Amino acid sequence: MANSHVLITRKRLLVLLLILIILIILLMTRVGYWSLWRGEDLKAQAESQWVKDIEVSAKRGSIMDRNQQILAQSAAADTVVLLPEKIEKAQNANEIADQLSQILGLDRNDIYEKATNTDKKEIWLKRQISTEQSEQIEALGLEGVAFRDDVKRFYPNKDFAAQVIGYTTLDGEGQTGIERRYNTTLAGRAGRQVAETAKDGSGVPNGQEMMIQPQDGLNVVLTIDEITQSFLESACKELYESQAPESVQGLVMDVTNGEILAMANIPEFDLNSPPREDAEALSALSTNVITATAYEPGNIFGIFTAAAAIDSGSAAGEYSCTGSFATDGDVVSCLNGAHGTQTLTDAVLDHCSVGAAMQANAMGRDVFYQYVKGFGFGSETGIDFSSDTAGSLAEKRYIRNADVAAMGAGEGLEISQIQLASAACALINGGTLYTPKLVLGLSDAEGNMVESYEPEVRGQSVTAETSAQVRTIMEARAKEDGISLTGYSAGAISGSAVQHKDSAVVADKAVATYIAYAPADDPKYMVMITATGVTATDSVESVCAPYVQNTLLGTLKNGNIMPDETLQPEETVTVPNVVGMELQEARDALADIGLRSSYDGSGSVVSQFPTAATEVHKNSTVALTMETKAIQPEGTEMVTVPDFTGMDMTQAKNTAIASGLVFVARGNGVVQEQSPAAGTQVSRGSSIVVDFKLQIAAAQ
Ligand SMILES: [Zn+2]
């Protein structure tokens, strides 16, 4: 039984195989018939009817400023090609190589090689040449040299806002910045032309033709204002040239809605000729540091810690700084030594890291973290741009008390400049955190806005009351720093951070940031400038201040913000040298330019404070030290000058007041010298001039 079953199966297989073989033979015969007997016929048929399918490119949209001033535009530009067959006939390869190498700045031998390469019908020599080059070549009338239509991206302002606008490939593909972020919108959609043609491209009678029209790209209208941008760029360039930092970044924002009016990165590069062959240089130059790079913010963060302390109701009346603050074995220190006992305002103004650490710790991890997140730190800002780093903020559960203290002082977290600027706007405007905006909307070829982007609120960072209190602190900063905007009141905040390179600290270098806004009573514009890798000095925090001031003044005028007529600008004068003058002569010289004077004694002036050439506000007092002490009239109380050595500012001031002396301070830190010397008998109400010097904290 089993054997017969196997036999049947084999028979079936054999039949199947036979059928297969027959089929294959049939197929082969048919293929042979078509290719051997009918092949020529088919070929002829195919050659008579071709379908031409050509892509019809769309015009790339422009990039414009908020007043529709063109910042990037596509324009026709010739591409020059070589036709080797024609060149061979004309025997002019040498002439072509000589002439074109000169006009186009290309290698002569390279051109010659291409011109004589008859394997190819057409060779592209150089794309998107200038009109001038095109005209020069055309005038030569060289046989075998032709032009093809091409489109070149053109940036009329060259390096203007280079890292914001971005650049494209030669084929018009956006690589960085707005060109990249809005590539699809700008590019539009290519069309197609499909037609039946003869082999030579000529039309076929009754042939079918179909055209899909291209859809041109839309224009991207930025929030950038060309005029404000040029104010900012010249200020940043001036800073870059005078202070020799590694780089400078600048930003102008409308604090009422998050719109960016200007954004600059120095050094810049010409967008018309990016260094395409040097990838490293191109990447460094085209990076928008403001949105792409995160760094440790340092003491400027103190303003946010203070705002959180005020807002959460955890702010204390006084903070006592001994120069360092230890939590869980970690230490936060003030680089310039102890600040002594101070109010929250003074702690912020003095960049007291210890005070900031104390405020953060008093709030506690959960509350502090909530505020840090509420200011937008640790998340992307949502800016409509090609880069938007979230920075680096540890997850809450990994944060210890020591980390809270450090973060309060701006250490142990990383933020981007755009995060900092957006958060600062929220501090100033009543607490509203807006998404920073670079694009106002999209417009069509006729300039009609087809889409407008409204301001976006991300959240409420602090209450309006807290914001008002913070503004008072910032107004004090602007006054102290002498920010002077004729006719406008201002607020400011400054800070410096440690400069890092390849995760190591760079000694003697710092990142300095200055922020100012105006008008103080109804804030509209904020300017922020950061110098990266600037020389670290005692006054590094304010290195960017004059440049911020100039940009802000220009922005206010350009924005048609009316100056406050009632505001009397505080006039400054230069202190003259009165040493050696007789008393009355010296007092008259000072009074002539609006300065008061204080003196004790008679004869000629031995020394003065402030010294000659110092800039001071009008009505300031200049203390004069005289040759001979005045003979004390009867009844005048005499006091003994105490020893101020080693005291800090607060201690010295209190001691002077307690002794009935007028306190005149010079410098910062602890007392090094004093005049008159300790033990001297002087009349009550005399001036005591005390010299302070900074001391580097021993504890590290
Ligand atoms: Zn301190």
Image (cartoon, rainbow, N blue to C red):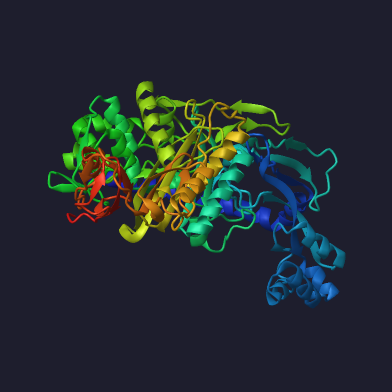
380 or 414: nearer the viewer: 414
Residue 208 showing in the rendered view: yes
- Tell me: residue 24, above or below residue 5: below
40 or 320: nearer the viewer: 320
Residue 8 showing in the rendered view: no
Q: Position of residue 384 (x, y in %)?
A: 50, 36
- Tell me: residue 661, above or below residue 586: above
294 vs 171, left or right, is left
220 vs 24, left or right, is right
Residue at the image point whose x is 29% and y is 30% from the top:
308
Q: Position of residue 16 (x, y in %)?
A: 43, 46
* Rendered-image quadrant of the N terminus: top left
Residue at the image point whose x is 82% and y is 60% from the top:
135
- Tell me: residue 76, above or below residue 357: below
Residue at the image point whose x is 40% and y is 54% from the top:
603
Residue 66 in which image quadrant: top right
Residue at the image point whose x is 84% and y is 38% from the top:
206
Residue 486 in which image quadrant: top right
Residue 348 in which image quadrant: top left
Q: Position of residue 340 (x, y in %)?
A: 22, 42
580 or 632: nearer the viewer: 632
* Rendered-image quadrant of the C terminus: bottom left
17 vs 354, left or right, is right
Q: Position of residue 469 (x, y in %)?
A: 36, 27
